[in-house]
Image (tube, rainbow, N blue to C red):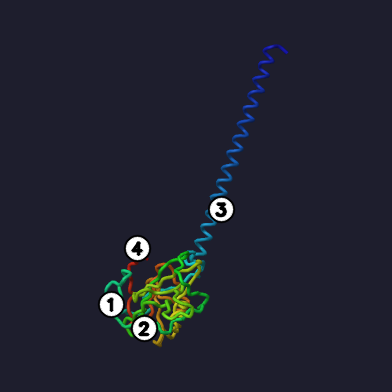
C-alpha cells in the first residue's frame, strides 16, 4: 500500500470515529430529552392527581388532613339580617361583641384530658394557629367568654388546654405539641357545653353553621378549627349575615 493509500485509510478511519462519536452524542441527547419529557409527564400527572383529590374530597394539608368540607352558598338561607356593628377592640385587637356570654366557664373541664387534649402548665407552640367563632341566638350576638380551656381550679394546678380563649372576642387559640385536626366539638367539650345539630350550649333549636362565608352542611361538632377559619353558629331567627374579622398580625 502506497503512502497516499495509507493516508487516505487513516483519514477514513478518523472520519468514521468522529461519526461514531457524534452518533453516541446524539443518542445521549435524545435519551436525556426522553427522560426530561417523562419527568414532565410524571410531574404533570402528580399535579393533576393532587388537584383532583383536593377538589373531590381530598385532604386539607394545612389542617392536618381535614376532609374536604361540604359547603353551599348562603342563598339557600334566604334573606339574612345585616351583621351588627362590631364591638370595641379587645386586648387581642379583635372586636368584642357588646352582648352577654352564651355561657360561663364554670362548666370548664378541670384538668383531665378531653378528647385526647391535655391541660398543661406551659403553652404548646409546635402547632400554633387561631380560628374565630361568632354565635347568634334569635338574631342577637352572644359572647364566647374569656378563659375557656384555662380552668381556674384545675386538679393539678394552673394549666391551659391546647384549645382555649384569652378574651371574649371569639378567638380560639390552638396551641398543640403536635399538628393534628381539632374541631369545634373538641372546643365545646373542653368548655363543658353541648353542641350538635339541635343545640349550642344552653340554646336549643335548629343550628345553622357558616364557615368562611359559606353555609356548612353537617354536624357543627365536626367543623375543623383551621388556621384563620371564621365560623358562625346561629339558632333561631332572624338569621344574620356572616360577621367577618381581620386577624391581627399577632394572630
Density class for disc 1 (Cα within 10 Å; few <14, some 14-19, many ≥20) is some
Lower sequence index among marks 1 and 4: 1
The residue wearing badge 1 is: 84
State the CA–CA distance, disc 2 to disc 3: 53 Å
Q: Which disc, if any, is residue 249? A: 4
Secondary-structure class at tag 1: loop
Q: Residue furthest right?
A: 1
Is 233 or 92 nearer to us in this picture?
A: 92
* As drawn, 118 above or below 25: below
Q: Position of residue 85 (x, y in %)?
A: 26, 75
Residue under pointer 2: 102
Instruction: Indicate the position of residue 219 as horizontal and vertical percent values.
Output: 47, 79
- Mark 1 or 2 closer to N-term? 1
Q: CA distance from mark 1 to mark 2?
A: 17 Å
> Which tag, 4 or 2, sits closer to the chain's start?
2
Q: From this viewpoint, is residue 113 visible?
A: yes
Q: Position of residue 146 (x, y in %)?
A: 36, 77
Depth check, mark 3 against mark 4: the one in front is 4
Going from N to C along the chain, the mark reached first, 3 or 1, is 3
Amino acid at each position: 500500500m502506497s503512502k497516499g493509500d495509507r493516508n487516505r485509510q487513516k483519514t477514513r478511519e478518523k472520519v468514521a470515529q468522529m461519526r461514531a462519536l457524534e452518533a453516541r452524542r446524539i443518542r445521549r441527547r435524545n435519551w436525556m430529552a426522553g427522560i426530561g419529557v417523562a419527568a414532565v409527564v410524571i410531574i404533570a400527572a402528580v399535579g393533576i392527581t393532587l388537584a383532583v383529590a383536593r377538589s373531590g374530597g381530598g385532604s386539607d394539608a394545612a389542617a392536618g388532613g381535614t376532609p374536604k368540607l361540604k359547603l353551599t352558598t348562603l342563598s339557600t338561607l334566604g334573606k339574612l339580617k345585616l351583621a351588627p356593628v362590631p364591638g370595641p377592640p379587645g386586648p387581642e385587637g379583635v372586636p368584642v361583641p357588646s352582648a352577654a356570654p352564651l355561657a360561663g366557664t364554670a362548666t370548664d373541664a378541670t384538668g383531665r384530658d378531653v378528647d385526647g387534649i391535655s391541660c398543661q402548665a406551659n403553652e404548646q407552640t409546635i402547632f400554633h394557629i387561631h380560628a374565630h367563632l361568632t354565635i347568634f341566638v334569635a338574631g342577637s350576638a352572644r359572647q364566647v367568654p374569656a378563659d375557656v380551656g384555662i380552668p381556674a381550679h384545675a386538679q393539678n394546678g394552673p394549666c391551659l388546654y391546647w384549645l382555649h380563649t384569652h378574651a371574649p372576642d371569639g378567638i380560639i387559640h390552638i396551641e398543640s405539641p403536635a399538628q393534628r385536626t381539632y374541631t369545634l366539638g373538641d372546643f365545646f367539650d373542653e368548655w363543658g357545653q353541648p353542641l350538635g345539630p339541635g343545640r349550642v350550649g344552653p340554646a336549643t333549636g335548629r343550628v345553622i353553621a357558616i364557615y368562611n362565608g359559606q353555609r356548612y352542611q353537617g354536624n357543627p361538632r365536626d367543623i375543623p378549627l383551621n388556621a384563620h377559619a371564621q365560623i358562625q353558629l346561629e339558632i333561631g331567627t332572624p338569621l344574620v349575615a356572616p360577621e367577618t374579622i381581620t386577624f391581627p398580625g399577632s394572630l
